[in-house]
Image (tube, grey):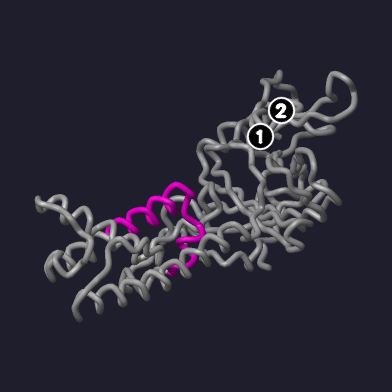
Amino acid sequence: MSVIKKKGKKLKTDTNTGFGANASNYGGRFINKDGSANIKKTGIGFIESISWYHTMLNIPSWKFMAIIFVFYGIVNFIFATIYCLIGVEHLNGIIANSFTDKFGQAFFFSAQTFTTVGYGHISPTGFWASFVASVEALFGLLSFAIATGLFYGRFSKPKAHIRFSENAVIAPFQDGKALMIRISPYKNTNLTDAEAKVTLGMRVKEKGTEVNRFFSLDLEYDKINALTLSWTLVHPITEDSPLYGFSKDDFKNNKGEIIIYLKAFDEMYSNTVAIRSSYTFEEVVYGVKFVQMYENSKDNSRTVLHVNKLNAFSEIVFEEVLTEE
């Protein structure tokens, strides 16, 4: 930890964030909204720079399925072309007059061989046709083994089904004001022992040079036993806070980012899940408060959580506590 001064007060900075201090070497934000690092790596080959396993586990479902179908189509197209080059007369059972019909039947024979279905009405004859069919069958077995592993990995991968509010807010709190961020689970999961950590990154001038400085923001509650409803992370802006004295214009005129790290225990996976996100100062709304997200049901038998109200807030009347100290 190092110490800097702000308005005559000494503030401890966090030096264990993993981010560099040289502000001129940083572009944009530190952490993207989806929690990924805002980093582009160069100086290494494209193939070498990508973990294909991690990529296939993390891409959206529609992209994953699209890759599977495109791969399946391309492989069968290639093998159908090879069968046509060898000669479809070496595939017993094909009855076709035009090249299109011949290629189509070769394509579907390839699909049957690749998937090891083998209906039997078409069979290879001759060395080369039989050799290609045997290679395709082996390639199909290996491909489906990989695809099955990826499907299982995506299905069983522990994931924190938690959403963050789109904005952080500055709202009245007790006799002053506080920075507030709201989170909520959105799946039918049971999360316990949730723990949050909030770090503020700001560009400050030291000896005429802009540098990055990071501060741990103390929370009213940084741990809760169960995350079943919404949880509002509250950082009281006291004299010990690096945000003390910040007005609405200060958030507009300064560059800063609020980074949230959250972890919880998922009973279904029997494992700890983690998620992170961030808010730039431009995404901090000053002088509002979050709207209640949950209420009792009409028959008073259950609590209804309105996930669509996660980022809902209402304007408040500015009071003395919301002006710059």
Residue found farthest to the left: 98
Q: Quadrant of the C terminus?
A: top right
Q: Quadrant of residue 251?
A: top right
Q: Are marks 2 and 1 in contact (CB under 8 Å)?
A: yes
Disc on the earlier residue, 2 or 1: 1
Secondary structure of residue under mark 2: strand
Nearer to us in this view, 204 or 119? 119
Q: Amino acid at mark 1?
A: Val
Q: Is residue 67 magenta?
A: yes
Element type at mark 1: strand
Residue placed at 85% from the left, 25% from the top? 296
- The residue singled out by tag 1 in the image is 169
Q: Residue furthest right?
A: 300
- Classify residue 90 as left or right of residue 53: left
> What residue is at 77 percent from the left and 42 percent from the top?
236
Task: Estimate the spatial distance between the alpha carbons at disc 2 and disc 1, rounded to whole Å.
Answer: 7 Å
Magenta stretch bounds:
51-74
Q: Main secondary structure of the magenta part?
A: helix
Q: Residues within 10 Å of mark 1 (few under 14, many from 20)?
A: many
In this view of the protein, which residue sits in the foreground, 141 or 186?
Answer: 141
- In this rendering, the answer to whether 33 lies above or below 48 is above
Res. 50 mark? none
Which three-letter amino acid code belongs to the residue tagged 2?
Lys
User: Which residue lies under the disc numbered 2?
Assistant: 289
Residue in the foreground of this view, choosing between 97 and 196: 97
Q: Tell me if mark 2 has few (under 14), some (14-19) or many (20+) residues whose alpha carbon lies within 10 angstroms of its own.
A: some
Is residue 307 shown to the viewer in this render? yes
Residue occupying image coordinates x 14% and y 66% = 89
Residue 240 image position (x, y, % from top left): 76, 50
Q: Residue placed at 44% from the left, 47% from the top?
A: 62
